[in-house]
Structure formats: structure tokens, C-alpha cells
């Protein structure tokens, strides 16, 4: 098992000294600034600006600088941060706790690494961070992070009332998510085509319905929780962390009054069917996702709750 591999270092990027992180960023943006200045200088010598008018020069500098900063900023946003690599210690050093804002980057990058097939991943890290922020902020969602010696190694997110969460997310975060998503698609033709082909109509309908619905945010409409995403760092798998995360999610769902939990997992090698089957989940059938891929729909009853939600 990987946790016994002595070559894996215990140096997660998330704990790089903040000064190191700031210096590298500063150096990066200083280079962008220098590049823009050089381009501006070049433009200033174009025949169009031959008369060296003050206004013309200012226009050249502004156009060149903003184009360079925008282009580099967009290009930089394509890079998903690499999650940290850690050695897993004994079970007593594994702790699962509610995610805090500092964990958002970790959750988003782990998702991009372990669940890279998702459409949202193709919209870039900024969108992923905004997406995970909804799980931390929504009163109808659960976001947990597993840590070993204080370093994040796994996460699970889900919702305890899917309809209420959808309403909350569309109303409170809809404009931000739509804005970041639209901005990302401006420079990503393939995801844009995928979005128009597979999701545009459904999202438009969901947007309209959830914006128009009455102010019933606080009213639970279902007692079936949904485990939306779960993942553990590759170097930390097989040590019981996924099991702990799934268990604690179900405890939270039970505590929120849910009588049942559900999830979908891809069929075949890319899914985790056996992981769930051996933990009491039941297969309920196959569903075809927006991209045409087959997923298993699985459920589990939560002890001590009436699955109908009447309890
Ligand atoms: C699924 C996942 C979260 C499990 O985390 P973990 O920390 O390795 O889980 P645990 O250590 O608690 O359990 C390990 C057991 O689950 C099994 N398992 C783990 N991943 C599995 C998978 N993808 N398919 C089938 N079984 C799996 C292991 O074989 C092991 O079985 P054993 O107990 O009989 O030896 C982790 O493998 C992961 O992040 N996978 C990539 C992301 C993913 O597929 N998420 C689920 C999408 S629904």
C-alpha cells in the first residue's frame, strides 16, 4: 500500500511558506508587466503611432498592457493546482472535520485530479473553487475534509436537501457561477460546444425554475441526501480514509433528518462500485449522464430514520 512507501514526501504544497508563494507570484506578474511594457514600446514605434502623439502612445500602452495581462491571466487560470502528496500515518492520526475556506483550493484541485472527467473541471480552477464554495456555504450541504497530521488528504461533499440546495445555489451563487463559467467558455471552445450540446437547455430550465420558486429555502423538501463527490489523494488511498469520509457524511445526513442517501458512480474501472457495495450501498439501476456516460445509481438506508422522511 502506498502509505508504506518511504519515498513519498510529506511536503504538501499547501504548507509551502506563504512568503515563498508570494515571491513566486510577484515574480510572475512582474514578468508579465515587463513583457507588456516591451510590447507597448514596440507598438509605440509602429507607423500608426509615428507622430508620437501623447494620446496615441497612451492608447498603445494601455492596449498592449491590458491585452498581455488579460491573456496571461486567462492562460494562468487554466492550470489546476496540484494537491499535496503525503504519507498516510496510522488511523489515529486521520481526522475528518468540516471543511473551512482554506480547504477550498485543496478540494477543487483534488477534484480536478481524481474526478477529471467532470464538465466543471474543464471550466478551470476559478470555477471549481466557486463551485466548492457553494458546498461550504449552503445550509443544505455538507463538506468534510480528512487530514493527516493537519495536512488535507481527502474530501467529501454532498447535500442533505438537493432541491433546497439547488434553489440556494442558483439564488445566492447563480450569478457568480454563471459569470465565471461564461468567462471560462470565452477561451474554451471545446467545453463551450459540450455545454451547448449537453447542458444549456437543462441549466436554463433549472435557472428559471429555481429563481422563480417561492422563498422556501429553509423548508426541507426531501429526506434523501446525495453524496456528490468523494476523493482521496492517490498516495493516501487504501488506508481507510475514504471509508471514514463516507461514514461521517452519512452521520451528518442522518443528523439532518435524512432517511436515505444516494449517489451515482461511473460504471466500470472509472467508478467505485465495489467500494460502496462493501459498505452497505445498494445498486438501484443505471443512469445515462448528460455526456452519454453510464453511471450506477446507488442508495443506502440510514439507521434510525424513516426513509420517507416522516420521522
Ligand atoms: C474511492 C476512494 C474515495 C476510496 O478512498 P480510500 O481512502 O482508498 O478508501 P478506503 O481505504 O476506505 O477503502 C479502500 C477499499 O476500497 C476499495 N476501493 C477503493 N477505490 C475503489 C474503486 N475505485 N473501485 C472499487 N473499489 C475501490 C479498495 O480496493 C479497498 O478495498 P479493501 O478494503 O477490500 O482492501 C478513492 O479510491 C478515490 O479517491 N478514488 C478516485 C475518485 C473516485 O473514484 N471517487 C468516487 C466517485 S463516486
Image (cartoon, grey):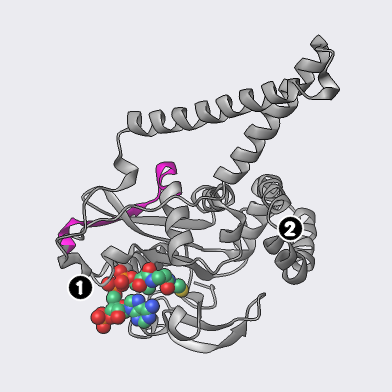
In this rendering, the answer to whether 311 lies above or below 216 is below
* Quarter residue 274 falls in: bottom left
Q: CA distance from mark 1 to mark 2?
A: 46 Å
Quarter containing ligand 1? bottom left
Q: Residue at x 74, y 25 (%)?
A: 43
Q: 144 left or right of 206?
A: left
Q: Secondary structure at mark 2?
A: helix
In the displayed structure, 73 sits above or below 268; it is above
* Residue 275 visible in rendering: no
Res. 71 image quadrant? top right
Whether residue 239 is in magenta: the answer is no
Magenta-tinted stretch: 91-104
- In reply to whether residue 98 is colored magenta, the answer given is yes
User: In the structure shown, which secondary structural element does the residue marked by tag 1 occupy?
Assistant: loop
Residue under circle 2? 210
Camera-nearest residue between 78 and 153: 78
Q: Position of residue 268 (x, y in %)?
A: 47, 86
Residue name at image x 41 percent, y 79 percent = 272
Q: Nearer the viewer, mark 1 or mark 2?
A: 1
Mark 2 C-beta to ligand 1 under 8 Å: no
Amino acid at each position: 500500500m502506498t502509505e508504506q512507501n518511504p519515498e513519498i514526501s510529506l511536503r504538501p504544497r499547501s504548507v509551502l511558506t506563504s512568503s515563498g508563494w508570494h515571491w513566486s507570484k510577484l515574480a510572475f506578474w512582474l514578468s508579465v508587466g515587463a513583457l507588456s511594457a516591451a510590447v507597448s514600446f514596440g507598438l509605440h514605434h509602429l507607423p500608426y503611432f509615428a507622430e508620437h502623439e501623447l494620446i496615441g502612445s497612451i492608447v498603445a500602452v494601455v492596449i498592449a498592457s491590458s491585452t498581455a495581462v488579460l491573456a496571461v491571466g486567462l492562460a494562468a487560470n487554466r492550470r489546476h493546482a496540484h494537491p499535496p502528496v503525503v504519507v498516510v500515518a496510522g488511523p489515529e492520526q486521520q481526522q475528518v472535520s468540516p471543511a473551512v475556506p482554506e480547504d477550498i483550493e485543496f478540494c477543487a484541485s483534488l477534484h480536478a485530479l481524481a474526478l477529471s472527467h467532470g464538465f466543471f473541471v474543464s471550466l478551470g480552477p476559478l470555477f471549481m473553487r466557486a463551485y466548492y464554495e457553494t458546498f461550504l456555504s449552503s445550509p443544505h450541504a455538507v463538506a468534510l475534509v480528512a487530514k493527516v497530521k493537519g495536512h488535507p488528504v481527502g474530501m467529501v461533499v454532498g447535500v442533505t436537501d438537493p432541491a433546497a440546495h439547488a434553489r440556494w445555489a442558483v439564488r445566492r451563487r447563480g450569478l457568480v457561477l454563471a459569470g465565471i463559467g461564461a468567462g471560462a467558455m470565452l477561451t474554451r471552445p471545446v467545453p463551450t460546444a459540450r455545454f451547448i450540446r449537453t447542458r444549456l437547455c437543462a441549466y436554463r430550465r433549472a435557472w428559471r425554475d429555481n429563481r422563480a420558486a417561492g422563498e422556501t429555502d429553509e423548508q426541507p423538501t426531501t429526506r434523501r441526501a446525495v453524496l456528490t463527490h468523494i476523493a482521496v489523494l492517490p498516495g493516501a488511498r487504501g488506508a481507510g480514509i475514504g471509508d471514514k469520509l463516507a461514514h461521517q457524511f452519512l452521520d451528518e445526513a442522518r443528523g439532518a433528518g435524512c432517511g436515505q442517501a444516494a449517489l451515482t458512480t461511473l460504471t466500470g474501472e472509472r467508478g467505485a462500485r465495489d467500494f460502496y457495495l462493501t459498505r452497505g450501498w445498494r445498486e438501484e439501476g443505471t443512469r445515462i449522464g448528460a455526456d452519454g456516460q453510464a453511471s450506477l445509481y446507488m442508495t443506502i438506508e440510514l439507521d434510525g430514520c424513516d426513509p420517507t422522511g416522516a420521522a
